[in-house]
Amino acid sequence: MAERALERRVCPTTGLTVYKTTETLIKINAVVAIVYLLIGGVMAILLGLTRWPAVHLLPVDWFYRALTAHGINMLIFWILFFEMAVLYFASSVLLKSRLACSTLAWLGLALMLGGSIMVNVMIFGGKADVLMTSYVPLKGHPLFYLGLILFAVGALINVFVFFATLYVARKEKTYEGSVPLVTFGATAAAIIAVSTILHGAIALVPTFLWSLGLIEAPDPAWYRLMWWGLGHQSQQINVAAMVSIWYFLGFLTVGSKPINEKVCRGAFVLYILFINIASAHHLLVDPGVTASWKIWNTSYAMYLAVLASMIHGFTVPASIEAAQRRNGYARGLFEWIKRAPWGNPGFAALILSLVIFGFMGGITGVTLGTQQINIIAHNTMRLPGHFHATVVGGTTLAFMGVTYYVIPLIFRRKLRFPRIAKYQPYLFGGGIALMAISMTFAGSAGVPRRHWDANFSGAVLPVDLGPMAIFMLGVVGIAATIAFLGLFMYILVAVASVFFGKRETGVVESVFNSRRDTVVSTVAPSTHGFDTPGTVMLTLIFLATFAVYFFANLKWLSNVWWVR
């Protein structure tokens, strides 16, 4: 009964009911996420300047320390804290429901926050230079593993609060019909999160006991198999959340609605069913699993997960094109793009996220996930080139875009420095795209993924990667600097707006002319039909690009073994 008496308000902009507890939890999770984004971003610029041979900033011990801190703070803490805010918004706010089990929600937040602080203390104290993967037999301090376990338990608690809130909303009939597509996508992310955290427990609990000296070291091959059930699936939580935000931003910026909601929901189901199988592409050079297992998991099975991304990669821009054509921008193939609200950072972040994730992350990911091609790219700079395109250029950029709406709608603050916000996605997205491309070319030239010194100074056997590799590492350093400036602009706008922005009490008038229709209408697909020749043309360009890149890699592979 206490939950029912909680303070709540009706948002005059969206018509949604926002409970005070939910609002506070969203605020705290979002602020903590941005703090960890800043920490990870500082580590990123240090790493970029270290990989640049002309600068070579950090000594070897601090290089691996920064690499560990960068990976964990960016890929785990920044992303998952923000995703907790997304889950609360997609359940309690979008469904106009009270939050179920608020006490558990606060407990989950406390465990996540305490665990993340513990992990960072161990890393920066020099007691866990084991990188994000923490492969056995590398050993960190027991508190490092304990912190990760506490964080995971807190995240799992919050996921269960999300499911419980869905149940409360359905039981109390706070919405009609099916849940909105955004909530459905968040549900897919939450389901994947449960499997992901369970894999993490299977890998990390024995490792924690080993670090205490209570058991023998886990088998390295077993550890890698279990850990990638955590490592890969955690990024697919991001993908499901990112795609949900794509649909949300499309509606907010141009009024787009799903052109076929059943197909979109089916694609989310494909993520749930097959994304874990796709984790196998991290083990393609491991001797502990058979070739037939590798081929099955990284071809036939993985392609069903890839199909889901390709469906969303079509339906999101198609829904935007259909909306733009209904808005009057219907001449030729691409007037809908030309007349799009490019000055709106939410829209710019949406499109840049979609393009970088699809054209760069998607194409390189499927190619690198092919067993035959993987052998020539594994553990080179091509790997971080791929996941910087997906996780940073895709997920992080989408999260940045939706922040520009979260601040006025949840924090009730007017956005500060709108001109900086207007250009921020372009600077950040451009820097990340350039970084991903230069990393890919550096990897193709033979630069190893995690080595501190590309010149291999002092090596017993001389190594000369050639001028192209050194040049591309310089571009990586420049691109990292550009991306960091874009990241700093985002943090500046977010922090200044949250703490110093003018307080809004009535309808939020967006400085970017965003849609003011009720957000709940995202549950309803378009009833006008659709004509999307521009998206069809872009899809054909994507498929042609993918074919050229894939077969170029096969040609490169054929040159490795000379047949006479």
Image (cartoon, rainbow, N blue to C red):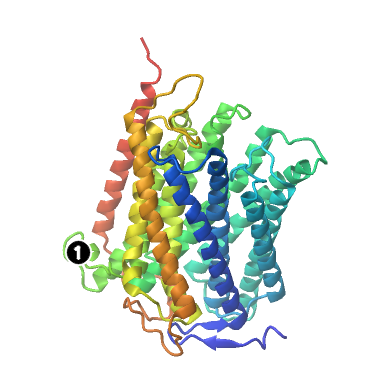
Q: Is residue 466 left or right of residue 7?
A: left
Crowd tier of the residue under label 1, counting other residues whose Cα lies within 10 Å: few below 14, some 14–19, many 20 or above: some
Amino acid type of disc 1? Glu
Quarter of the N terminus within the rendering: bottom right
- Please state which of residues 56 and 431 is positioned toward the viewer in this rendering: 56
Q: Is residue 341 left or right of residue 227?
A: left
Q: Residue drawn 21% across and 69% down?
A: 329
* Picture coordinates of residue 511, whole percent (x, y): 33, 79
Quarter residue 102 falls in: bottom right
- Please state which of residues 66 and 366 is positioned toward the viewer in this rendering: 66
- Please state which of residues 234 and 316 is positioned toward the viewer in this rendering: 234
Q: From the viewer's perspective, is residue 19 above or below residue 422?
A: below
Q: Residue drawn 67% across and 86% down?
A: 4
* Picture coordinates of residue 78, whole percent (x, y): 54, 59
Q: Residue drawn 46% across and 63% down?
A: 399
* Picture coordinates of residue 166, whole percent (x, y): 61, 71
Q: Residue drawn 39% across and 27% down?
A: 465
* Picture coordinates of residue 113, whole percent (x, y): 65, 64
Q: Is residue 288 left or right of residue 458?
A: right
Secondary-structure class at tag 1: helix
Quarter of the C terminus within the rendering: top left
Q: Would residue 2 be visible to someone looking at this image?
A: yes
Location of mark 1 (residue): 335
Quarter residue 333 falls in: bottom left
